[in-house]
Amino acid sequence: MTTIAGPFIHVGLLYSGDAEYLDGTIPYILEGLKLDEPVAVAVPGRNLTLIEDALGDAAAEVELIDMTEAGRNPGRILPGVLLAFADNRPGPVRIIGEPIWAGRSPLEYPACAQHEALINFAFGDRDLSVLCPYDRIGLEDGVLADAERTHPILADADGDRPSENYAPDAVVEQYNLPLPEPLVAEAFRFDLLRLAAVRHFAQGRAEESGLGPDRVEDLVLAVAELSANSVLHGSGQGVVRVWRDEEYVLCEVVDEGTLSDPLAGRRPATPGQIGGRGLVLVNQVADLVRQYLRPGSTVTRIFFRV
């Protein structure tokens, strides 16, 4: 069993129905406010309304975030929601984060599970607590089993208990999955001298796929960052493909480097840091980012909803 030291507390709240949801979240929020701790609530819209209504006037003291928007790309939740809130506030902080709900697609779920596992490493030395609700009725048994592996503490209507199955590193590895083969044969090979050309290639294919102008710009920006990373930190070269399915315009970058930091792209760069911003930016602009890491190769696939 993996052990995470430090004052960080990460609790999986297993609830059934609205009453149990509010019984598990509202006292947690009110206790934080009583202790003058900054509190953020980042949950899907319907649950956000439940909490806001239950808090009444106290809701004005809480930062309320719709996770269906802020966290539609699971890779954005750590840098753009949790760390964005915690890093600007000294002392103890508490957050309710619900990144997994019944509407999440099977395509998104592996990134969600990895996110929940990586939280334990991102906050290991922080005086901070995160409460993550899981809907026992709406979520599949496998998702609930993963909650036990990604949270060192579990809570339900009967109280709190240590998770006997806690193993976040195993979850990160389990969902490091090969991605389905791209739906195109054409591949653009790039190196240092072709970084400008790879951007033009990506722009042309994205426009042909029907992506709107603003999203084409975001896709090209993401491709520029990924290809530059391949050249600077990988083998110096890589391959790009762009195609469309029913829901997304997709872009895949493959290089011969291997990411050694599982939190790459999930932590904002510190002031004065040289490099390390590219993957964070990719997570910020894409609707979904999936990666498959294997010895000697990294496959990064980014999704832009049509």
Image (cartoon, rainbow, N blue to C red):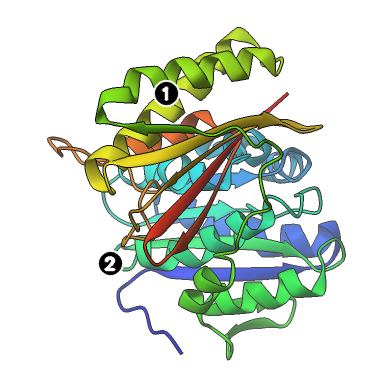
Amino acid at dot 1: Val
Residue 39 vertical placement versus 80 (above, below): below
Asked which secondary structure carries label 1, the reply is helix
Q: Who is closer to the viewer here, 254 or 246?
A: 254
Check disc 2 and report the residue beneath it.
Answer: 125
Q: Label 1: few (<14), some or many (≥20) within 10 Å?
A: many
Residue at figure coordinates x 60%, y 64% from the top left: 177
Left or right of residue 214: residue 193: left
In this view, the residue in front, 198 or 53, is: 198
- Residue 159 shows up from this direction: yes
Q: Left of 250 or right of it: where is 2?
A: left
Q: Which mark is residue 198?
A: 1
Residue contact at pointers 2 and 1, CB within 8 angstroms: no
Q: Nearer the viewer, residue 244 or 28?
A: 244
Residue 21 spot, x, y in % from top left: 75, 60
Horizontal arrangement in the rendering, residue 211 relative to residue 64 (left or right): right
SS for callout 2: loop
**Looking at this view, is 148 or 112 the one in front?**
112
